[in-house]
Image (cartoon, grey):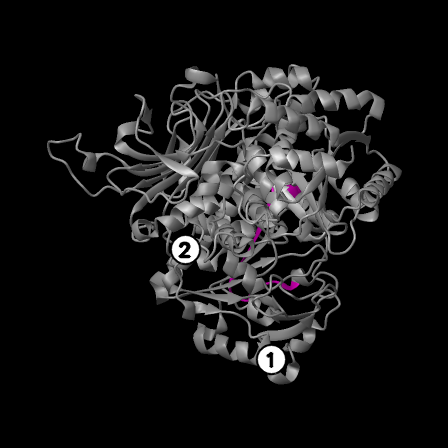
Amino acid sequence: MSLAVSLLLVALCAGAGYGEEGTQAQKAGHVSVVVVGGTGDLARKYLWQGFFQLYVSQVSGGNTFSFYGGGLSPSEQATPVLFEILKAVTCSKDVSQDRCAILKDQFLRLSQYRQLKTLEDYQELARHIEQQLQQEGMTEAGRLFYLSVPAFAYAGVAEKINSSCRPADGTWLRVVLEKPFGHDYLSAQVLATELMGALKDEEMYRIDHYLGKQVVSKILPFRMENRKFLDPIWNRHHIERIEIVLKETLDVKGRISFYDEYGVIRDVLQNHLTEVMTLLTMKLPANVSNSGEVLRNKREVLGSMLPLGKNQAVVGQYQNYKTEVQQELNKTKEYVSLTSTFAAVLAHIEDAQYEGVPVLLVSGKMLDESVGYARVLFKNDVFCLQSHNNVHCKPKQIVFHFGHGSLKYPAVLVSKNLFKPVLKGGEWKEVTEHKDVDVLGLHISDYFVQTPTTEREAYSELIHHIFAGQKNNFVSTENLLASWEVWTPLLSALRASFPRIYPGGADNGDMLDVHLRGKEIRFNSEAVIISPDQAGGPSASSFQVMQGKFRGAEMVSAWSEELVERLAADMQEAAEAAVREGGIFHLALSGGSTPLALFRRLVLHHFSFPWRDTHVWMVDERCVPLTEADSNFHSMHKHLLQHVRIPYYNIHPMPVQLNQRLCVEEDGGAQLYEKEINKLVNVSSFHFVLLGVGYDGHTASLFPGGKLNEAGGSLVALTESPIKPHQRMSLTFSAINRARTVALLVMGKGKHELVTQLSRVKDNLEKYPVTWVKPDNGRLVWYIDYDALLG
C-alpha cells in the first residue's frame, strides 16, 4: 500500500480537528518530523504523544506526514526502543477504540528510527526525504526538527541541519529547542550567536512548556475579554500584589548533575515564572495572535523591571540535597553545595501602571504540595464591622490555577466580590457544581470558576502551535537575552550566599514564609543556616570594610557588595550635605560597566536620596546617538535615571549629536557643555565626581597616548579611544580636579595587575592618565574591592 493511500484511509476515519486556529493558513503538503533524541525521557513522556495528537488532527486537512526518531545509537539497537514508546501513545476520549487502533497502526507505519550522529547521517536523512517525496509524488510543506538533546549539542545539530537538511525555497523549516537556553546572559548570548550562524530567528522555536498550559495561554485572552471590568482596577491603585508560585513535593534525585549547575532560579524562575509575569503585566496587544506585538510588549516589561539584587531574594535548600549531591557527583562528605532548591524573589515593574506593586515569584522542591498558580490580589477598601463573613470583606482576587493542588484541575477563578467573568467560545466552560475545597483563603463557592472544556497536555498544545507557525507562545532571541539581563545580576549576587536548610514537606512549617518590606524581602522567622565554618571557608561577610591609603589618597576596600554599599552611602551623605549648604547637588557620573552595581544600590535602597535637588552630569560619552545601547547616557538612563524621581531638567547629557552629525569639532558640542557647566555649577566645581579606571589606566575618556595636555584650561574636550567607538567627549582633568570629591571605583580580579602597577608608579600622564586625578582643593577617595586589591 502506498503512503498516499494509507493516509487517505486514515483521513476518512480521523475525527474533528484539534481546534487550533490558523493551521489552515499555511500550504498543505507533506511534513517530515524529526525528533533528535527520539528515545529519551522527554520524548517518551510527552513528545511522541504530542506528535500523535498532531497527526490525528491534521491528516484530514490535506497534510501527510513522516516521523523520524533520531539518536546516537545504532538503528538495530534503538528501533525496538522507539517502537515500544510509539505503541504507548493514546487517543483522546472522543475517539472510538476501533478508530484509535487504525490511527495508531498508521502512525507506527509512518515512523522509523534513524541514527543521527555524523554529518553523513543527516545527509542520508535528507536524501531519504527527497526520494520519498519523488516516489510518492508529494508536494513538501515543511520540515520540523525537535532537538530533545542537551543544550551543548544545539549548535552542532543546527549546523548539520543547515548544511544538509534544508528544504527547497518556499518550504518552511522549524527547529524546536528545549531549555536551558544558557546559564547566564553571556552564555545565552554565545549560544544565540552560534545558532544564528545556522538558523534564522523565525526558524527557531524555543519552547517553554509552561506557555502551553491551558490556563497560562488563557491569561491574555482573559484580560482582553474582561477589559470592561479589568481596565479600571488593573493598576497600582487597586492591586495589592501579584504572586506567581510553583510548588513541588519531589526531590531532584537522578537530576543532580543538571540541577546542581542550574538551581531553582535558572530552572524555573528565569523562564516559566518570568513568562507568566510578563503575560500578567504586559500592555495588551491589539491582536493576541500577533506574535511580534506580543513578544515586543513582553520585552517592554522586562526592560521596565527594577534591578534584582541580593536583598530581593531569599533562597533555601532541602536537607537531603547535600547527601544526594555527594552520592551522585561522587563528592566527599566535606563538600557543601550552595545550589538553591527553593527561592522567593521580589520584583517590581517601574512604570506608571504597576509602580510599587510587589511581584512575588516563588518556587521550590520538597514542599508541602504540588501546585502552580498566579494570583492577583486586590486591595479591599470595605470594612465590615459585624458581618465578617460578608462576601465584600473577603479577599478580592483572581487566581490562574495551573493545576494539581487541592483543586486538582486547571481553572481561572474570580472572587465573587469582583465581577463575573465573560465566557466566550466553546473551549472553556463555567463550573457550577463544586466539591468542598478552599483555594488560597476562599471557599470554592466564593469564586466564579472557569475550566477548559477538554484538558490538553502542554507539549501537545505547543506542538500544534509550532506546526501552525504561531510564535507568540515561544521565546525569541531578544526576549531571552532581556530575561537573562534581569536575572544574571541576581545570580551573581547570590553566588556565595548560603541557602536556608529546610527539612522538606509538611515539616517545613513556617521556615520558608517570607516578609516583604518595601522593595526588600527576607525570611519571616529566624532559622539555623549553614555557617561559613561548616562550608570550609570564609564568606564575604567575614571581612569588614577596611580603610587605608593608596597613592597618598584615602582608600576604602571591601568585598564588592559591601564596597558599593559604602560608596552609595558616602554619595548620599555628600548629596545631603550639599543640599543643606546650598540647596543643590551636582553629581558627575562616568560611563561603562563600572557604576552599574552602584546604580542598582541607589535605586533599590536609597529612597531618601535628594534626587529632586540633584543635577546629574556626564563624565564622558561615546559619540553615538543617545538612543543606542553603546551610549553611556542610554545605560545610565536604563539602570538609574528612569527609576528615580529626578526632574528631567536636572539631567544633562553630553551634546554629542548636533546638526545631525556626531562629535564634529566645528559644531562646538564640547564648548556648549562647558558653557552649561559654567552657567549652572558654582565656580564649575562639581560636588561629587565618580570615575572608573580602564585596564590600560585610562579614566573618563582620557586615554594613554592621547593629547591630554592640549585641552589647556578647557573643562570639556573631544578625545580619541583606541577601541570603537573611537570618538568620545569627556570632562578634562581641569574639570575633574575642581571637584569637591572625586571617587575612583575599581573592582574585579581583572584589575589586580593594574592596581599593583599603580601602587608603584609615579604620576605618568602618557602611560597612566588616572594618576593625574588630583583634586585641587577637594578630596580623592579610591574605592577598591578585595578582588582588585588582593587578586
The quarter in which the C terminus is drawn is: top right
> Most extreme residue toward the bottom, as rendered?
666
Horizontal and vertical percent position of residue 673:
53, 76
User: Which residue lies at the image location 65% right of the left edge and 17% below the top edge?
Assistant: 326
- Kindly state the secondary structure of the residue where label 1 is placed: loop
Work out whether residue 143 or residue 156 is closer to the camera in this orientation and state it: 143
Residue type, mark 2 in image = Asp
In the image, the segment drawn in magenta is: 772-790
Dot 1 amino acid type: Gln
In front here: 22 or 704?
22
Judge whether residue 158 can be spotted in this image: yes
Q: Is 289 inside the magenta-drawn segment?
A: no
Please state the horizontal and vertical placement of residue 466, each as a whole percent of the image: 62, 44
Residue with the mark numbered 1 = 660
Residue 781 is one of the magenta-drawn residues: yes
The percent position of residue 381, horizontal first and vertical second, equals 20, 43
Is 561 above or below relative to 762?
A: above
Task: Name the residue located 18 percent from the left edge and 29 percent from the top edge.
Answer: 389
Q: Would you name the residue on which mark 2 appears?
A: 351
